[in-house]
Image (cartoon, grey):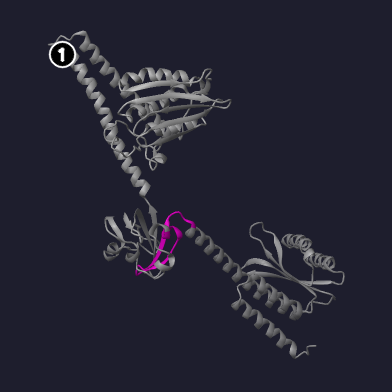
Amino acid sequence: MLTLPDFPVRQRDFLLEISRAITAQLDLSEVLRRVLEASVIMIAGRVGVIALHDAKDGSFRVRAYKGIQREQVADLNDQLNAFINTVSAGTERNQLDQQLKEMASSLNSDLVQAVAMPLVFADNPLGLLIVFRSYEASVTPNDMQILQSFADQAAIAVNNAQMFQRIKQEQQRLSAILQHSADGVVILNADLEILQVNRSFEQMTGWSTDQAVGQSLDAVIVWQKIEGQDLQDAVAQGWPTRRSVQAPHADTFYVEGDLLRQDGLTLSIGITYAPLFGQDGKLTTIIGNLRDITNFRRAQEMQNVFISTVSHELRTPVALIKGYASTLMRPDAQWNEDVIRNSLQVIEEESDRLTTLIDDLLTASRIQADHGVQLQLGDVRLDLIAASAVERLQLQTSKHRFVVSFPNGFPSMQGDAKLLRQVIENLITNAIKYSPNGGTITVGGRFTDENVTFFVRDEGVGIPETEMSRVFTRFYRIDNKWAATTKGTGLGLFLAKSIIEAHGGTINVKSQVDHGSTFFFTIPRD
């Protein structure tokens, strides 16, 4: 049993212990446990609780308790929030004391008195500390001073621990964003030495984190080809320059080129460097964001080829139409019927080429503008469309034999007749183009109760396996010896895929080099 001279010493020791806990511990649960333990002992209580304020919903919830069972906590939370609401309403002190006595009695019939103290830090209410006694006595100024000291220490501890928890959560969130970003990230110090990289950086450069950290940037980022100046050159010329104290971030610096990976392969990347400054205005950190621009460059190159190809495709039929029309209109010449007929046939064929090209361009434009294909649905007979297309297109070639193969009773389906005709004619035209030595072109279909399937089979040059996954890409043309001499914009199969998928169907190809290709699509009948 403590003697009176020992009691202040014990109080001092407890306060010292709690102060040490605050400075040594950022574990909120451990700090609350120590504060509560000291509070209960120092004012001779039997039960103690600390409830903290939840900023999300404004409620108070028990975060530490002593002398009660876990099962009692849920009911105690309700009573605590009711008590807080009573305090907020400005109720008289005696009514608050009565409410605390009822709370004590609900926890244990032996408890007859409660001493409560708010936890406040910088005028911000953080929670509530309550100690319950098994005897009723006046609360002395010493009791209140002790409890106030513990409450103040607890408030500091809670604030510190919550700040640490928020910082830790923010660090974890930023770390998760950094590691799982699709772009590569490299963090540099002011001397351009690597402090940290993420997984995407490892994949792009071939350097692991252990290998890269501590290296100078120019040892890891090695350019095989670069457009403009590198970061080292920019820094040597005075980048970055901080604008003002109010604007701590300077302008970013961008560089792109072909990166030489550690394994000897190359990758087209663009890097955006962003500087960070300290309070003293000095450069502390540079964050580099690496983006793989291989596909962008490929798309840009394909688009340039497309523009060049379209210009050529437009110029050729226009020149032929104008040439034959001008020839027929010469006033100084008399043409016989065969010459006139042949000239008009050329004009008609080239006009059809122009119409097809314009239809493809307009359809591609609508797909991009509407983010999809708008269908005008009606009853469609693919076998009749195919027969009509073969009848028209076989006039363009004398090398090919056409076979139309549809089973009896081939059904109609719901679809956009104009767009499906465009697909079918495109597939047949491709079969003619890419079988320059002639052969049989088979156009046919099959059906089930649910679907109809259409196919075009040729005996042409075929498609390499490495190319088949890309033939339906916009502007893409197969890279073989026939591409340079075969007319086309690289839009036809892209449009075919978009149109078929808009009908809820799928389109694919089977092919073997030098043995021909079979393009086929399947669409639901309804």
**Does residue 17 lie above or below 346 as drawn?**
below
As drawn, the residue found furthest toward the left would be 332
Q: Quadrant of the N terminus?
A: bottom right
**Does residue 229 lie above or below 483 as drawn?**
below
Task: Estimate the x, y position of residue 473 in percent, counting from the top left.
Answer: 39, 38
Disc 1 designates what residue? 330
Q: Secondary structure at mark 1?
A: loop
Left or right: where 494 falls relative to 329:
right
Question: Where are the magenta residues, as a range?
Answer: 180-202
Residue 201 among those drawn in magenta: yes
Tell me if I can see residue 502 in this picture.
yes
For disc 1, the neighbor class at 10 Å (few under 14, some 14 to 19, many from 20) is few
Q: Quadrant of residue 224?
A: bottom left
**Does residue 435 lie above or below 398 as drawn?**
below
Q: Quadrant of the C terminus?
A: top right
Task: Estimate the x, y position of residue 245 in percent, counting from the top left.
Answer: 39, 64
